[in-house]
Image: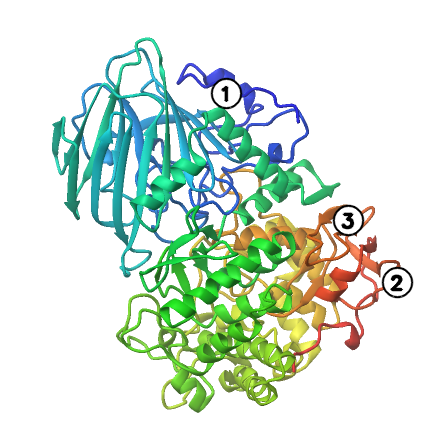
């Protein structure tokens, strides 16, 4: 493929050229664009700056799909980069897309000039302007006000930096081992020779202190430095080769003479195993020039994005769509070294055989959307991800809830690992591991981890199994770091029941009939927290009494949401839930109120932005849809079960307007690709309405045609085309649907349908029709 050479930044003097390159984009707080190119590549459409402002918490830096390394600038925001800030503290090697608390940021590296006098990166941070900044998949570049140009790219396990200095004999590269985005407990740095530095960094955190992890790095420069030293606390020591610190600043600095050769390149390799692992990763993936690595990174992203070819739609939609698709491939992350070794959750070294080990599990989020998208577009990697989760159980004794690196954080509540793994099973990704997965899930569903183990699992399971609900115990001391199901008893009950419904399906398929009957009965436990006097779910205390305000918008005991927003999270039995609240007419009235449907019809974008959205962390005190958070992501698809499927399209298309091509263009935190995957799937018109099963709800695609390339190992037809000729903002209602030419009146597909079909086509019009309105057209209840 022809490649147009990338113009080189040259500090502040590059402002006009950068502005031209960015196509006249507004800077200084309005929008930021990816650097456009002219050879028709899909990577040209990706804007890595989307979500970097207003707590989207994404990062604009360089990575490859699912890479261990995410080399990106840190500006002072607790999760890394904030578009509203104008100083860079360093380019660190570890970031996660859209996390809600400080996490990663290990080994920030910054080029400087002059004497090294400051050791706090908040003080030596370099000012920059967005005029001098650009990013595209696998690349980030910025001109610092110090006159230094910094460029970043990455391989799977290494980050590659290129620094272009002014002419000086005091060009420095600072490797900060003692500061990160969360707490650095201890660090060691060692200058091995005139080109190489290694570190060992022990960190802890993510919303609360957790068990520590260790990441090892080795950084190799393309030419020798003229002198070097270390710092410890405030003390800078020239000539020092080693330094270690506990809970204090610590680092190494290397000096180069750039009087003639102004460019310095460095490659940093990571390992979560040991220093030998970092060295092996460097030998395997290092040794190439910056330009070669960048070209390879760009090709890897182009290959991923080419798996989905969208036609039609506005330029804005295409850019936000491919940017969302890009973010959907950023996690989970490779955790094993090139030799297959990895550190398990027992903190022992293991070796992955015939699979790649992955880590970083935001399961409370990703089980709803991203896991299903990856099962379609990256099934081989998804299989390895599911096997990795099973290794966590085998090595640590329990399945994960929210795992970072080599440790459990226990952030979020409920039982998200069950629908994650049952989804993998239903999508055919666990062949050969079915019974192992089932045993792990059964243990998780029927028990509670030991007090001395790190995970909390289904923390309230004793009460749930006895009484049918998890009690809400306000102010109960946490037995372990992280969140507690007792703090969110109502939503934990709904999450447990959802997982029981999904596990029942797997048990039935595998012939465990008694278990299937037991889990099917437990899937009805959502009824135990339904209060007939209010018509909504409510928390119950240890005595069984309903507790907290009766007003469902002021409810307590729901995690990051209200009873209104959790009302619809019963995907295992929507018909039963609808009956509880008075039937389809009552459900539709409540849904219309929840989505402010009358206002939405008059002005979808305004309703989405001014009625639904109240702020990135405004989880409570609301009776409206919250498209910025996970609990009601499935809610727009409830209309498929209430006989009004056209309203699903109305609501989904209104929510899609919240994704825009600028720094504020995310709906809340991305949560490791969750929101991005929601956007991708909803734009295609095929959405996992029962997460953990093989059921996909349908709505009108946002594009006229989407061609999806599928892996023939899992999808024998190798492709699926979803088409809706003439689809637009006005002509958005499904009049009829055909699957390989056969009339499709159901509002859902199964994974077997996707495996056997080549085309799903919609005829659309400007008015709602009777398509999908019969009771038999709705997604079925489980069991």
Q: From the viewer's perspective, is 249 left or right of 778?
A: left
Label 3 CA crowd tier, 10 Å (few <14, some 14–19, many 20+):
few
Mark with earlier residue (1, 3) = 1
Q: 61 above or below 485?
A: above
Q: Is residue 750 visible?
A: no
Distance in Å between CA atoms under marks 1 and 2: 52 Å
Look at the image and name its color scheme.
rainbow
Residue 516's disc is: none
User: Hey, which quadrant is residue 13 in on the image?
Assistant: top left
Give the residue pinned by disc 2: 742
Residue 466 seen from this side? yes
Secondary structure beneath disc 1?
helix
Q: Are marks 1 and 2 in contact (CB under 8 Å)?
A: no
Residue 592 shown left or right of residue 109 in the figure: right
Q: Residue at x 79, y 61 (%)?
A: 756
Q: Position of residue 33 (x, y in %)?
A: 54, 32
The residue under label 3 is: 730
Taking depth in this image into account, of 160 and 106 the one nearest to the observer is: 160
Q: Are the two marked residues, 1 and 3, in contact with CB atoms closer than 8 angstroms? A: no
Secondary structure under badge 2? Answer: strand
Task: Say which of marks 1 and 2 sits in front.
Answer: 2
Q: Quadrant of residue 270?
A: top left
Q: Residue 271, image x and y in percent?
A: 36, 46
Q: Quadrant of the N terminus?
A: top right
Number of the front mark, 1 or 3: 1
Question: Going 31% across and 33% down the picture, which residue do you hit?
Answer: 109
Q: Which residue is mark 1?
A: 18
* Count of numbered labels shown in the rendering: 3
Report the Cα–Cα distance between label 1 and label 3.
38 Å
Q: Quadrant of residue 250?
A: top left
Q: Quadrant of the C terminus?
A: bottom right
């Amino acid at each position: 493929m022809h490649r147009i050479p990338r113009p080189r930044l040259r500090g502040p003097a590059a402002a006009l050229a950068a502005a031209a390159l960015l196509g006249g984009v507004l800077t200084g707080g309005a929008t930021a664009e990816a650097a456009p190119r002219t050879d028709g590549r899909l990577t040209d459409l990706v804007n890595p700056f989307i979500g970097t402002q207003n707590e989207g918490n994404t990062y604009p830096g360089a990575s490859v799909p699912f890479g261990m390394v995410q080399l990106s600038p840190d500006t002072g925001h607790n999760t890394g980069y904030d578009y509203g800030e104008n100083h860079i503290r360093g380019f660190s090697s570890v970031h996660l897309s859209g996390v809600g608390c400080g996490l990663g940021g290990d080994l920030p590296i910054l080029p400087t000039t002059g004497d090294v006098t400051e050791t706090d990166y908040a003080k030596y941070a370099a000012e920059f302007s967005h005029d001098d900044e650009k990013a595209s998949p696998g690349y980030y570049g910025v001109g610092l006000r110090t006159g230094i140009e910094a460029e970043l790219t990455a391989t799977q396990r290494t980050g590659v930096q290129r620094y272009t200095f002014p002419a000086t004999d005091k060009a420095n590269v600072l490797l900060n081992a003692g500061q990160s985005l969360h707490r650095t407990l201890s660090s060691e740095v060692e200058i091995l020779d005139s080109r190489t530095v290694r570190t060992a960094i022990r960190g802890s955190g993510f919303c609360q202190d957790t068990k520590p992890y260790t990441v090892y790095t080795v950084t190799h420069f393309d030419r020798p430095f003229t002198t070097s030293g270390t710092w410890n606390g405030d003390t800078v020591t020239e000539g020092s080769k080693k330094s270690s610190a506990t809970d204090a600043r610590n680092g190494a600095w290397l000096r180069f003479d750039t009087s003639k050769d102004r460019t310095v390149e460095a490659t940093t390799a990571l390992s979560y195993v040991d220093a030998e692992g970092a060295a092996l990763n460097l030998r395997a993936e290092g040794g190439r020039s910056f330009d070669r690595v960048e070209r390879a990174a760009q090709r890897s992203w182009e290959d991923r994005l080419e798996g989905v070819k969208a036609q039609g739609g506005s330029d804005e939609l295409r850019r936000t769509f491919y940017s969302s698709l890009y973010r959907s491939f950023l996690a989970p992350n490779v955790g094993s070294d090139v030799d297959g070794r990895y550190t398990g959750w027992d903190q022992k070294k293991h070796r992955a055989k015939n699979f790649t080990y992955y880590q970083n599990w935001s399961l409370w989020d990703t089980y709803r959307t991203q896991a299903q998208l990856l099962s379609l577009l990256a099934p081989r990697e998804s299989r390895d991800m599911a096997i990795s989760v099973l290794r966590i159980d085998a090595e640590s004794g329990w399945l994960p809830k929210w795992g970072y690196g080599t440790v459990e954080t226990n952030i979020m509540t409920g039982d998200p690992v069950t629908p994650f793994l049952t989804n993998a099973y239903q999508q055919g990704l666990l062949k050969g591991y079915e019974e192992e997965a089932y045993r792990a899930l059964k243990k998780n569903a029927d028990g509670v981890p030991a007090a001395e183990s790190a995970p909390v699992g289904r923390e309230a399971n004793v009460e749930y199994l006895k009484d049918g609900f998890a009690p809400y115990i306000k102010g109960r001391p946490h037995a372990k770091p992280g969140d507690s199901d007792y703090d969110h008893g109502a939503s934990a009950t709904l999450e447990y029941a959802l997982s029981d419904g999904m596990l029942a399906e797997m048990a039935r398929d595998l012939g465990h009939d008694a278990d299937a009957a037991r889990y099917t009965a437990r899937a009805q436990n959502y009824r135990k927290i339904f209060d007939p006097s209010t018509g909504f779910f409510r928390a119950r205390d240890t005595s069984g009494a309903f507790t907290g305000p009766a007003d469902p918008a002021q409810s307590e005991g729901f995690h990051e949401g209200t009873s209104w927003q959790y009302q619809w999270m019963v995907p295992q039995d929507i018909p039963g839930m609808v009956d509880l609240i008075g039937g389809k007419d009552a459900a539709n009235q409540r849904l219309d109120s929840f989505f402010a449907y009358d206002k939405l019809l008059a002005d979808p974008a305004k309703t989405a932005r001014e009625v639904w959205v109240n702020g990135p962390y405004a989880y409570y005190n609301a009776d409206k849809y919250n498209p910025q958070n996970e609990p009601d992501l499935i809610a727009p698809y409830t209309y498929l079960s209430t006989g009004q499927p056209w309203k699903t399209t109305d609501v989904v298309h209104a929510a899609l307007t919240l994704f825009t091509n600028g720094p504020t263009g995310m709906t809340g935190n991305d949560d490791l690709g969750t929101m991005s995957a929601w956007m991708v799937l909803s734009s295609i018109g095929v959405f996992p309405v029962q997460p953990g099963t093989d059921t996909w709800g349908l709505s009108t695609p946002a594009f006229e045609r989407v061609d999806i390339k599928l892996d023939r190992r899992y999808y024998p037809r190798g492709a699926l085309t979803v088409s809706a000729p003439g689809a637009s903002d006005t002509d958005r209602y499904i009049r009829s649907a055909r699957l390989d030419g056969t009339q499709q009146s159901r509002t859902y597909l199964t994974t077997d349908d996707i495996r056997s079909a080549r085309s799903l086509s919609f005829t659309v019009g400007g008015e709602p029709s009777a398509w999908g309105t019969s009771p038999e057209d709705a997604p079925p209840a489980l069991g």
